[in-house]
Amino acid sequence: MMDWIAMTTGFILILMGLYGALTHRNILRIIVSFTLANTGVNLVLVSVGYMLGRTAPILDKAVPMAEAVTRIIDPLPQALVLTAIVIGLGITAMMLTYAYKLYEAKGSLDIASYRELKW
Amino acid sequence: MIRNFAVLLLLLGLAGIFIHLMQGYIPATELNQSAHYYAAHSAEDLGAANIVTAIIVTYRGLDTLGEVTVLFLAATIIGMVLANGHKAQRSLQRQLPPSGELLTTASRLLTPLILLFGAYVFVNGHLTPGGGFQGGAILASAALLLLLTDPLKRFSHRLIAVVESLSGLLFIAIGVLGMVLAGGFLDSRILPTGAFGTLFSAGSIPLIYSLIGLKVGAEFTSMLNNLAETEKS
């Protein structure tokens, strides 16, 4: 059940983020929408690694070494998502930087006032 | 109107794909082959209690090196883009209001604690949830708190650069040592595995993760610093 909830939430977040990115005209709102979609992708990836009745991939007294194979969830998606979160943060910071530069150049954050790449 | 309609159509199509994916999704009941290997061998071979850490630092260490490089590039590009044309920086024209007694005192109390917590998180990365990236982000949040208290505060670029390049160089050096003393590049078994579940265990994993933590913290702080320097009157 948990994985279904997480996966549905993730997919909805992706759709919300894409909707926001495609319909809003303010660059800052577009950036926020992209981070929303990014979060959704991470949530879906993590939920794929979930297995019913199992626990986090950390070994201690509760999860002894010998039982690890039958007791823990898939650690690979978690490692993958850790990477994705960090890269996502770098991308967000870069998007904000470019938004600042664009604002400095034209004094506007409306995407419609940047027509150079439009055909 | 037509544009919004096209957007809705696109999203509906995507939603259809997602629903189809979810209907076909069968939750796994057993670990797949690679996950099975990691679960069975990482504690024995590397001595790391946190299997995610073992994967990130040792099994997929090269990916992590690439990740740190991407983050470094992002921080550098931000510095480059923002520094361009900022050479003659005007001083602040208007007087900023003081940030208030509460925030000032609280940040003086909290900053050392936040730094300590960040160090705790990345030093214990092989035992508990957490690690270099999380710890580094916590370190940078201390810098953010200081910036909130005093928006004109600037951290020394030289110090950030020294911390970042030193930890990056040491990270690579440990990786090369793994090639010389153990099985391959970034092999963590260059140090004794130690007693399972203690701080000084898991070979060089805590060392590498601490270096990653310092590097990530320095990179995030430099990003914050560069963005804060854009503040003008």
Image (cartoon, coloured by chain):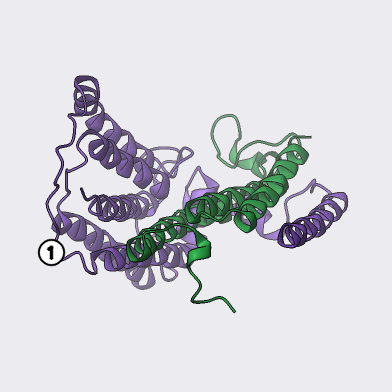
Q: Given the image, what chain letter belongs to the residue carrying mark 1?
A: B
Question: In the image as oriented, which residue stretches furthest toward the bottom?
Answer: A119
For the question of whether residue A49 can be seen, the reply is no
As drawn, B196 above or below A18: above
Give percent across and percent down for residue A20.
62, 51
Q: As rendered, which of B66 and A95 lies closer to the eye? A: A95
At x 23% / y 28%, what residue is drawn? B107
Shade representing chain A: green
Q: As rendered, which of A37 and B38 lies closer to the eye? A: A37
- The residue that mark 1 highlights is B88
Shade representing chain B: purple
At x 58% / y 48%, what residue is drawn? A36
Q: Quadrant of residue B222?
A: bottom left
Q: Determine whether the residue tagged by mark 1 lies in a helix, strand or loop.
A: loop
Q: Quadrant of residue B146?
A: top left
At x 80% / y 47%, what residue is drawn? B27
Residue type indicated by callout 1: Ala
Give percent across and percent down for residue B155.
17, 49
Q: Is A115 situated left or right of B164 in this image? A: right
Give percent across and percent down for residue B227.
29, 53
Give percent across and percent down for residue B89.
14, 59
At x 74% / y 35%, what residue is drawn? A2
As drawn, B99 above or below B167: above
User: How crowded is the residue under tag 1: few (<14 C-alpha within 10 Å), some, or many (20+)?
Assistant: few
